Amino acid sequence: MSSSDTPTITLHWLEKSRAQRILWLLEEINVPYEIKTYKRHPKTQFAPPELKAVHPLGKSPAVTIGNLAIAESALVVEYLSEHFGPSLIPTKWKAGCEGKAGGETEEYMRYRYFMHYCEGSLLPLLVVSMLSDNIRTAPVPFFIRPVTSRISGSIKTEFLDPNFDTHFTFIEEQLATSGGRYLCGDKLTGADIMMGYPILVVTSDLGDRGPANVNRERSPHMFAYAAALQATESYNKAVKKVVALEGEYVLI
């Protein structure tokens, strides 16, 4: 498809949001696009009501392609990959198994799984972790602080730590058996762009805010994976654009 045949793609950019990964995708598929920026409410940090004109939920990321509006990160990644970046989708069928249940390649099934696992299973844990940290550091009277610290500590030790242990052990095993640098082998896919955000968050230096037992010794494949993602040309182009938009690049 020539650039003249491509409808206008607009990324509706909410500051400090997971729209970062869609910007990365757009740089990877190398198609013309525009960015429309939105500011969060200074007190509530909610998205502005103008985003509801794009999609009824008023959230980001959202993309418009001509008159078509698409929301939800996984759907945006899948749709843009199908139409503009098919190299980001692994081969679907094993030879001679076209259209048969169970005939999909391992790479394709990994791709489909991690597209949904990211937001469905992993990121909710990170959101709870951030909320727990907010409780711990909330500006409360000194006599209340032991209570908030105890609540935050219980959430971390009783819920988050065992779940993080299960999930990051799983991810480490998946990377060890992928057959390449990425989740689905040696080629970057849409699933890697989806998973890049949480992986880069947890392998960053978060101090005591981060998941327990995530370190280079215990999770060497995960840290190598993060380095491979950060080395891609499209990721670095996206980071530069984020800095131009917001003045800095912040993962969390």
Image (cartoon, helix red, strand yellow):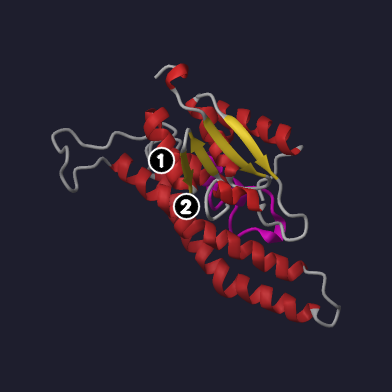
Q: Is residue 206 magenta?
A: yes
Please tell me which residue is depicted at 68% across the width and 73% down the height of the picture: 152
- x%, y% of residue 14? 64, 45
Q: Is residue 198 visible?
A: yes
Q: Is residue 134 magenta?
A: no
| Camera-side residue of 131 and 176 | 131
For the image, the number of numbered tags is 2
User: Mark 1: which amino acid?
Assistant: Glu
Number of residues whose C-alpha sits closer than 10 Å to that of mark 1, classed few (under 14), some (14–19) or many (20 or more): some
Question: Secondary structure under badge 2?
Answer: helix
State which quarter of the image contains the N terminus: top left
CA gap between label 2 and label 1 equals: 13 Å
| Camera-side residue of 248 and 147 | 248
As drawn, is 158 to the left or to the right of 87?
right
The residue that mark 2 highlights is: 118
Range shown magenta? 199-227
Q: Nearer the viewer, mark 2 or mark 1?
A: 1
Question: Which of the 4 quarters of the picture holds residue 232?
Answer: top right
Q: Look at the numbered discs 2 and 1 and tell me whether their residues touch, using CB distance below 8 Å.
A: no
Please tell me which residue is depicted at 48% across the width and 54% down the height of the picture: 119
| Camera-side residue of 98 and 94 | 98
The residue that mark 1 highlights is: 78
33 up-or-down from 249: above or below: above
Question: Which of the 4 quarters of the picture holds residue 143?
Answer: bottom right
As drawn, is 152 to the left or to the right of 127?
right
